[in-house]
Amino acid sequence: MENCIFCKIVAGDIPSPRLYEDDKMIVIRDIEPKAKLHYLCIPKTHFALLSEMDGERAELLKHCFERIAEIHSSLGLEEGYRVIINQGENGGQTVPHLHIHLLGGEPLKDF
Ligand code: AMP
Ligand code: ZN
């Protein structure tokens, strides 16, 4: 998708160290961390919203959550973490390429 910052990161056009990568997703550090550890799990396929879900995208997100469950300790999240997917304007989504925030590394405040 043209002009999508996360598509550019996935394509390598914008450099961003990958803490994990496979054929379907990458994990990078958020550039403006909101917790001691703040990662973004970015599916390699572009879509913006959960409301655009279809079977293929559901499989993609299933894959992402399975990998997150496997790799969270290697990211320093073994004491627990928060998973956030912001959706649309009221949800605070600023990048319209669906992504999963992983926050942790310290006790997180209630919200
Ligand atoms: P959201 O507001 O849920 O759409 O999340 C977008 C996130 O992407 C924000 O937390 C930003 O700090 C983060 N972000 C934007 N540009 C970059 C970048 N080049 N590398 C890493 N994280 C980024
Ligand atoms: Zn994109």
Image (cartoon, rainbow, N blue to C red):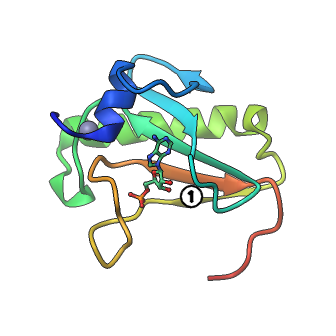
User: Callout 1: few (<14), some (14-19), or many (20+) C-alpha neighbours within 10 Å?
Assistant: some
Task: Tell me where residue 9 appears, x and y as whole percent.
Answer: 39, 29
| Amino acid type of the residue that numbered disc 1 sits on in the rendered structure | Val
Task: Tell me where residue 105 appears, x and y as whole percent.
Answer: 80, 53
Rendered view: 35 above or below 110: above
Image quarter hosting the C terminus: bottom right
Q: Residue 69 lies in what quarter of the image?
A: top right
Q: Is mark 1 within 8 Å of ligand 1?
A: no
Q: Residue 33 lies in what quarter of the image?
A: bottom right
Question: What residue is disc 1 on?
Answer: 83
In the rendered structure, the answer to whether residue 15 lies left or right of residue 43 reads right
Task: Tell me where residue 77 appears, x and y as whole percent.
Answer: 76, 46
Task: Tell me where residue 59 appears, x and y as whole percent.
Answer: 32, 36
Rendered view: 36 above or below 25: below
Q: How many marks?
A: 1
Q: Residue sitting at 29 percent across and 46 percent down?
A: 97
Q: Residue sitting at 57 percent across and 25 percent down?
A: 18
Image quarter hosting the N terminus: top left
Rendered view: 109 above or below 86: below
- Tag 1, which secondary structure? strand
Q: Residue sitting at 52 percent across and 28 percent down?
A: 16
Q: Residue furthest bottom?
A: 111
